Amino acid sequence: MYVIIAPIQIKDGHRDEFIAAMLDDARGSVSNEPGCLRFDVVQDAGDPNRIWLYEVYTDEAAFQAHTEAPHFIKWRDTVKDWREEGIQGAARGSHNIWPPDSEWK
């Protein structure tokens, strides 16, 4: 499995429209990408303008395919001015330990 954990800081005044666009991308990912097993959008407990994405793909190639999907490109282009630059933190690709790959459905 290939796991992405990505923090995103939303600019003040753009939270609702950002979240709406983000949910469209999340739904498109799990509905239209066979290699996307999970796409969670998580609200930070201390900052309503900070979210965390937790994404699980079958492998890195499936994640790369995600970045070329029409719903991702639409999301990226829609929200580009609604994100804070420079304070996002690093989105990183990782590999899961638990549950093991064989237990993912």
Image (cartoon, helix red, strand yellow):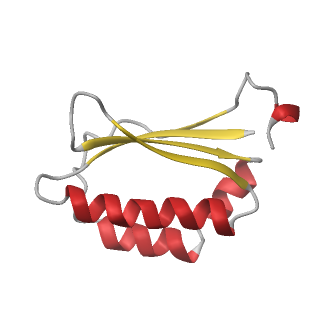
- In the image, 33 versus 67, the foreground residue is 33
| Residue drawn at point x = 63 percent, y = 38 percent | 3
Residue 66 sits above or below residue 7 on the image: below
* Residue 68, horizontal then vertical, whole percent: 59, 70
Q: Position of residue 42 (x, y in %)?
A: 41, 40
Is residue 62 placed above or below 1 in the rendered structure? below
Residue 27, x across and y down, in percent = 54, 63
- Residue farthest toward the right in the current orientation of the protein: 102
The image quadrant where one finds the N terminus is top right
- Tell me: 90 left or right of 1: left
User: Could you tell me which residue is drawn at 69 percent across and 41 percent down?
Assistant: 2
Residue at image position (18%, 60%) is 14
Q: Residue at x 67, y 69 (%)?
A: 32
Of all residues, the one furthest to the top in this rendering is 98
Q: In which image quadrant can residue 87 be found?
A: top left
Count of numbered tags: 0
User: Camera-side residue: 21 or 87?
Assistant: 21
Q: The C terminus appears in which quarter of the rendering? A: top right
Residue 3 shown left or right of residue 45 in the figure: right
Residue 73 image offset from top left, x and y in percent: 48, 73
